[in-house]
């Protein structure tokens, strides 16, 4: 029994001995392997080192103070695969410069394209925009020697010759005091064909016939404006004129006007409506503008009537007014001029206009304050009939019609149709009649007041971003691409600037351009899938609120950006408000146009998805060699 009891004890001791030997063997093997791999690692590291010896490393380290050594950030990213390609939003598009021959390119008024269209009624001078495959994908260059324009009010009288290098008008209008060349600049004496003593003296003559100083006249339209001296000198009387002239043989008329800092557009009275709402202007003016007022059943006077406010004025000077004195100088017969005046008088009467006065070279008519009598006398004046089919505010490629645009209804004969407007400057912030009457769905008096306050806050914020906007006199010509109620322009009314308020035609469900004019501001309709009717380098500053979101899926973003680049002056800036994703794409496009831009937070803080893109167009011009060619 004792011998048998010893057997298990000996077996357990043998098993324990074998287990210990196995563990020791494993430990020894692990130590050998670790040591081997460690030595291999040291050898591989020594092969890849940039130092030839440890003494070189010691010498380098000893020469660098400890305080200058920086901790190296370890890179744990894999490097055995190529980087991912950039996404579409981060890939900057590249837009090369156009040929210098395009330095004054106006896409929708291109002379060569216009020759394809009918010359009857000047249709060939209307807007005819390029097809999509004809659009330029390049940046319009400024002429060599281009300079930042003179600041207002000096700019009213001077412009740099290098900016608009044309002398045609200085020769053609030499005796009419329009424009003169003095060294490296143009001087605008303020003259005109019918006011050789200057626009100021001419406006004083008008002021003696109707009051221009009591605030009742604020917005005006000058048809066939020349270099817009009439509009330029009305500004000192707080009257804002929209001047237009066609791109014709008088080279660069509108370009000169804009270079001076005067509101103007390329335009012509032909077969389509002017791009303004009905009842927009307090005064219309034609000084030898060569428009055939008495022809085509009075079509052009009918269009002037559409855009004139109730009780407003039409002023005519030049042929045929005072033909008894001027007929020889006009190289026309007395019978011809007398007949022309008779036709104009007849059309004016058919529109129910009252001829207030004709004195010397001026004749002034007044539109009625309502259409109570006018509708009644259709029994006498069979033509033009009253229009009832078209929206009177629709004015984008809208054909002219020989019918009279009816005024809003009134309750009695003494009432002003569409309500009497407050006088300027109270008019700016008074509730516009189109809003108080409820004709714009969803826009109430409260909405109007809140919108005005909102834009005061926003413009104040803008001036902290764009110091050039805050600098008095740095900017003159401003463009708001999506004006809505004109709040942006209204917030800048005390600055020496003017704003072209654009209401996109895509926003026609709520057509607010009439409100802009009722506030005493100016603007036009525009489709931003097409070019604007203006010359390159027209504006000092462009503002856009959600404009790219509005045109998403309507046309290419890059075409709108290239149009902005075309009409913006070198070293001028833009501020665009939009969704952050839209602005990221826009920023990359502007980088490709060599604009300096940055995206900043909404004025209400970083948690708003709407951000603000601020960018400045860099200065660049055509080379002197290409300019000479």
Image (cartoon, rainbow, N blue to C red):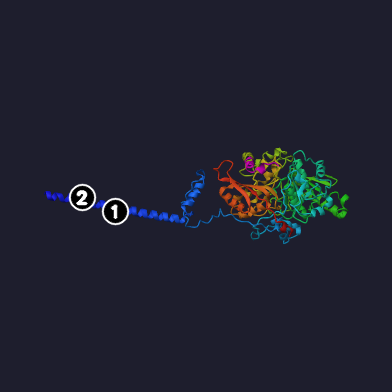
Checking the image for residue 8, the label placed there is none
- The relative height of residue 90 versus residue 473 in the rendered view (above or below) is below
Ranked by sequence position, the earlier of labels 1 and 2 is 2
Checking the image for residue 13, the label placed there is 2
Query: For residue 460: magenta?
Result: yes
**Residue 250 at what x, y percent from top left?**
78, 55
**Nearer the observer, 436 or 592:** 592
Q: Is mark 1 on a helix, strand or loop?
A: helix
Query: For residue 213: magenta?
Result: no
- Which residue was labeled with disc 1? 25
**Residue 149 at what x, y percent from top left?**
73, 48
Residue plotted at (35% across, 55% down): 33
- How much space separates mark 1 and mark 2, taking CA atoms? 18 Å
| Quadrant in the picture for residue 437 | top right
Prevailing secondary structure of the magenta residues: helix
Quick check: marks 1 and 2 in contact, CB under 8 Å?
no
Q: In which quarter of the image is the C terminus?
A: bottom right
Q: Which residue is outermost to the left?
A: 1
**Nearer the observer, 542 or 409:** 542
- The relative height of residue 217 versus residue 504 in the rendered view (above or below) is above
Q: Is residue 283 visible?
A: no
**Nearer the observer, 109 or 70:** 70
**Residue 364 at what x, y percent from top left?**
80, 45
The residues colored magenta run 458-472
Q: Is residue 165 visible?
A: yes
| Quadrant in the picture for residue 238 | top right
């Amino acid at each position: 029994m004792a011998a048998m009891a010893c057997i298990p004890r000996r077996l357990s001791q043998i098993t324990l001995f074998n287990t210990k030997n196995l563990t020791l063997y494993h430990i020894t093997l692990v130590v050998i392997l670790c040591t081997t791999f460690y030595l291999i690692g040291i050898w591989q590291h020594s092969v890849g080192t940039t130092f030839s010896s440890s003494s070189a490393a010691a010498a380098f380290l000893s020469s660098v103070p400890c305080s200058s050594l920086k901790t190296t950030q370890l890179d744990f990213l894999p490097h055995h695969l190529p980087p991912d390609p950039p996404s579409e939003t981060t890939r900057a598009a590249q837009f090369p410069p156009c040929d210098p021959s395009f330095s004054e390119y106006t896409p929708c008024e291109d002379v060569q394209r216009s020759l394809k269209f009918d010359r009857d009624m000047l249709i060939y001078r209307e807007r005819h925009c390029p097809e999509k495959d004809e659009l330029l994908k390049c940046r319009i260059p400024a002429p060599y020697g281009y300079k930042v324009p003179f600041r207002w009010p000096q700019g009213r009288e001077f412009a740099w010759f290098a900016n608009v290098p044309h002398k045609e008008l200085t020769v053609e209008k030499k005796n009419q005091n329009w424009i003169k060349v003095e060294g490296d600049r143009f001087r605008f004496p303020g003259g005109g064909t019918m006011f050789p003593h200057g626009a100021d003296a001419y406006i004083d003559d008008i002021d003696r016939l109707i009051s221009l100083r009591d605030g009742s006249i604020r917005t005006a339209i000058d048809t066939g404006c020349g270099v817009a001296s009439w509009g330029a000198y009305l500004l000192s009387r707080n009257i804002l004129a929209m001047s237009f002239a066609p791109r014709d043989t008088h080279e660069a008329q509108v370009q000169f006007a804009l270079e001076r800092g005067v509101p103007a557009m390329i335009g012509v009275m032909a077969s389509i409506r002017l791009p303004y709402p009905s009842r927009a202007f307090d005064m219309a003016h034609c000084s030898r503008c060569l428009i055939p007022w008495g022809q085509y059943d009075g079509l052009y006077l009918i269009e002037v009537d559409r855009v004139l406010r109730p009780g407003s004025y039409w002023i005519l000077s030049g042929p045929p007014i005072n033909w008894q004195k001027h007929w020889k100088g006009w190289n026309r017969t007395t019978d011809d001029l007398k007949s022309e005046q008779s036709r104009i008088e007849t059309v004016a009467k058919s529109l129910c206009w009252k001829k207030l006065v004709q004195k010397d070279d001026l004749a002034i008519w007044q539109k009625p304050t309502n259409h109570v009598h006018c509708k009644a006398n259709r029994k006498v004046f069979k033509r033009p009939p009253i229009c009832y089919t078209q929206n009177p505010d629709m004015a984008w490629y809208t054909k002219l019609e020989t019918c009279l645009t009816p005024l809003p209804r009134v309750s009695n004969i003494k009432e002003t149709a569409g309500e009497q407007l407050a006088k300027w400057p109270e008019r700016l912030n008074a509730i516009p009649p189109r809003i108080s009457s409820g004709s714009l769905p969803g826009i109430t008096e409260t909405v109007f007041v809140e919108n005005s306050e909102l834009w005061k806050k926003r413009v104040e914020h803008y001036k902290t971003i764009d110091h050039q906007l805050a600098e008095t006199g740095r900017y003159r010509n401003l463009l708001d691409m999506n004006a809505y109620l004109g709040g942006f322009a209204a917030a800048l009314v005390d600055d020496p600037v003017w704003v072209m308020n654009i209401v996109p035609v895509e926003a026609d469900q709520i057509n607010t351009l009439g409100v802009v004019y009722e506030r005493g501001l100016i603007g036009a309709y525009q489709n931003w899938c097409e070019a604007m009717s203006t010359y390159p380098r027209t504006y000092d500053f462009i503002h856009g609120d959600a404009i790219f979101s509005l045109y998403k899926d309507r046309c290419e973003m890059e075409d709108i950006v290239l149009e902005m680049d075309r009409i913006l002056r070198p070293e001028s800036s833009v501020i665009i408000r939009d969704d952050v994703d839209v602005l990221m794409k826009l920023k990359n496009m502007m980088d490709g146009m060599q604009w300096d831009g940055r995206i900043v937070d909404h004025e209400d803080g970083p948690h708003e998805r709407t951000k603000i893109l601020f960018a400045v167009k860099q200065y660049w011009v055509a080379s002197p060699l290409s300019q000479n060619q």
